[in-house]
Image (tube, grey):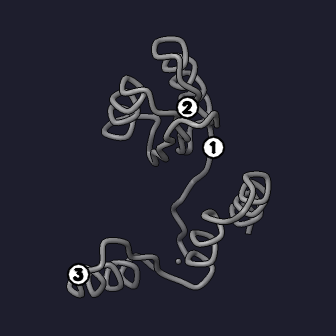
Amino acid sequence: MDGRETALITGASMGIGKELAKILASDGRDLVLLARSEDKLQSLAQELERAHGIRAHVVPADLTNPGAPADKVARHAYRSMMKGKVVAIEGLMNRLAAFSVRFSPRFVVRKLTRWMNKT
């Protein structure tokens, strides 16, 4: 975005995610807003940009994956938590995607994310 800290908010179109986005924007952070409802995200992004002078990037996506099973992810998260890990990422593709964000140019991350959302 423009050098400020940026926060990724999932479920940003309503509830806790929306309120968290408002708090982070009021603290001067740029945002990446992610949820299924693009129109709600666009509206929130415009509201926060006007009110707080931040930049908000909208990513309409459904992170639910009826295939990537909830019980498997929950078991992985629990095992990781019990080992004292702060971050738990289940699955090779998810780990690669998370790792690539640290070192890849933003346009590469966007293309990778777009590809992963389509598959």
Question: Which residue does the numbered mark 1 point to in the structure image?
Answer: 59
- Secondary structure beneath dot 3 equals loop
* Residue type for callout 1: Val
Seen in the image, is 45 located left or right of residue 52?
right
Instruction: Identify the residue under disc 3.
Output: 84
Which image quadrant is residue 58 in?
A: top right
Residue topped by disc 2: 41
What residue is drawn where x is 46% and y is 35%?
A: 13
Which amino acid type is marked by label 2? Leu
Which of 96/29 is in front? 29
Secondary structure of residue under mark 1: strand
Marks 3 and 1, the one that precedes in the sequence: 1
Gap between marks 3 and 1, in whole Å?
31 Å
Q: Do the numbered discs 2 and 1 sit on residues whose CB atoms are within 8 Å?
A: yes
Residue at 37% over, 72% down: 87
Residue found 46% across the figure and 12% down from its top: 51
In the image, which is nearer the foreground, mark 3 or mark 1? 3
Tell me if mark 3 has few (under 14), some (14-19) or many (20+) residues whose alpha carbon lies within 10 angstroms of its own.
few
Residue 67 position in % (x across, y down): 56, 77
